Image (cartoon, grey):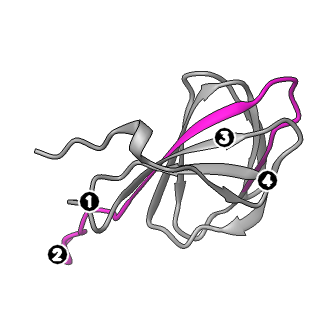
Amino acid sequence: MELKRYADANPFKFGDLQLRELTPDAFSGASFAEIVVPVGADREPRVSAKEHRMYICFVGEIQFSVDDNAFRMRTGDVLHIAEGEMYGFHNGGYQEGRLLLIRVPGPSIPQNL
């Protein structure tokens, strides 16, 4: 058992964003982080180098683009981004947004399929 306390996870700046790494030390191949997205902040488009990236919007609304698709994530929405997909996001709303980011390696695919 390992307890990771929110208050012990110091936030840090990543461009316009504020991140708080919440991953328990026992995990080496996965991560779990809170992202605070201030009004007007952007995550410039980039290609995902992680196998699986999942965003959960839990405060506000965030405009995402994934490849050629643009949409607004709202509270409770979950987005999966696979390795190789181009993605970015922007908070064009009137309140700070908050996302949870979960990154995990993918399952092994049997060679005999």
Asked whether 108 falls inside the magenta stretch, the response is: yes
Q: Tell me whether the residue at label 2 lies in contact with that at label 3, contact meaning CB atoms closer than 8 angstroms.
A: no
Task: Establish if 37 lies above or below 13.
Answer: above
Helix, strand or loop at label 4? It is: loop
Which residue sits at x=50%, y=50%?
10
Q: Disc 3 designates what residue?
A: 36
User: In the visual, does 11 lie left or right of 13?
Assistant: left
The type of residue carrying mark 1 is Asp
Residue neighbourhood size for the residue with mark 3, other residues' Cα within 10 Å, grouped as few (<14), some (14–19), many (≥20): many
Q: Does label 3 or label 4 sit earlier along the sequence?
A: 4
Any mark on residue 16, and which?
Answer: 4
Which residue sits at x=61%, y=44%?
35
User: In the visual, does 4 lie left or right of 14?
Assistant: left
How far, Cα to Cα, is label 2 from label 3? 43 Å
Task: Establish if 106 lies above or below 22.
Answer: below
Residue neighbourhood size for the residue with mark 1, other residues' Cα within 10 Å, grouped as few (<14), some (14–19), many (≥20): few
Q: Does label 2 or label 4 sit earlier along the sequence?
A: 4
Q: Disc 1 designates what residue?
A: 25
The type of residue carrying mark 2 is Asn
How far, Cα to Cα, is label 3 from label 1? 22 Å
Q: Does label 1 or label 2 sit earlier along the sequence?
A: 1
Any mark on residue 112, and which?
Answer: 2
